[in-house]
Image: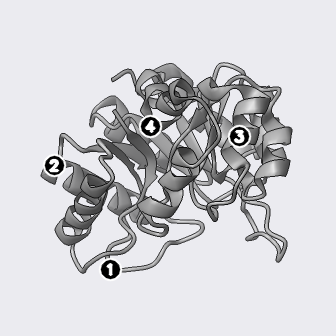
Amino acid sequence: MIIDCHVHLTRGGGTVAERADGLVHFADKFRIDKLCLCLGPVGRGLVDRPSPEVFRDDNDKVFEATALHPDRFIGFCYVNPVHAKESLDEIDRCVADGGMRGIKLWCAVPCCDPRVEPVIERAIDLDVPVLQHTWLKITGNKEFESTPDDMATLAQKFPNAKLIFGHAGGDWEYGIKAIRRYPNVLIETAGGNPEAGFVEMAVREVGAERVVYGSDAAGRSYASQIAKVYGADISEDERVLILGKNMQKVLKL
């Protein structure tokens, strides 16, 4: 089984159905079985610090797409920790009651911010992973964007949390070094250019059991992202773990 742990309804048509169909159509070409879906800004762009109304609407779009392809999509609940009560209520609506299997955090606050803590605690209670966007840009990050060091701080504070290190911090050499000592963090391959050496370094530093494949589609192509794993100089057993077996375990599929 191949599981893409990082997919969005961000491009590919005017309606939820058109975007969902497009994601599945191209996933079929690469034999990707399951797509972890979050963020559904159909009809508008992404919002850095979304209101409760915005993140509820995004999650509604994910519910809609998942209903169209229940055998392919696995929903992740998107929230903004600035709005603590509303975020916890949304996690209950989407995860505890709605069947989503993870939580997505983007650029509302750095993940080391104390306001993130109630979300992480709820994720631990529900035994679901948290996919945290991280990046370290040479041109400068967004105002509230998380860095690899922020992720390391969060991982140290919550050793029992299941944390997915989205994009491996962008600067993957720095990112891998920042979190390698924290066994509760999975390094995710999504979003950057398909550079040689990324997956090999991750496997060497933390082991294949802590690396997971993601694409960041539709913002990135499946082809460029899965090529990082297929093109890596690793064993076939390690490739199987990264492409799906690790996420199967995390998601309890």
**Mark 1 Cα-neighbour bin, 10 Å: few <14, some 14–19, many ≥20:** few
Tell me if residue 185 comes above or below residue 5 in the rendering.
Answer: above
Nearest to N terminus: mark 3 or mark 4: 4
- Circle 3 packing at 10 Å, graded few (<14), some (14-19), many (20+), is some
Q: Nearer the viewer, residue 213 or 29?
A: 29
Identify the mark nearer the N-term, 3 or 1: 1
Verify CB contact (< 8 Å) between mark 3 and mark 4.
no
Q: Which residue is mark 2?
A: 67
Which element carries disc 4, helix, strand or loop? Answer: strand
Q: Nearer the viewer, residue 174 or 131?
A: 174
Residue 191 position (above or below residue 177): below
- Quadrant of image for the C terminus: top left
Q: Which residue is mark 3?
A: 200
- Residue under label 1: 43
- Mark 4–mark 1 distance (CA, rounded to whole Å): 24 Å
On the picture, is 100 further left or further right than 118? left
Residue type at mark 3 is Glu
| Three-letter amino acid code of the residue under disc 2 | Ala
Total count of labels:
4
Which residue is at 52% across, 54% downward?
A: 227
Q: Could one spot residue 87 in this view of the protein?
A: yes
Find the distance from the CA under tag 3 to the CA under tag 4: 27 Å
Question: What is the quadrant of the N terminus in the image?
Answer: top left
Disc 2, SS: helix
| Residue at 76% in and 51% down | 172
Mark 1 residue element: loop
Residue contact at pointers 2 and 3, CB within 8 angstroms = no
Residue 210 lies in quadrant: top right
Q: What residue would you read off at disc 4?
A: 102
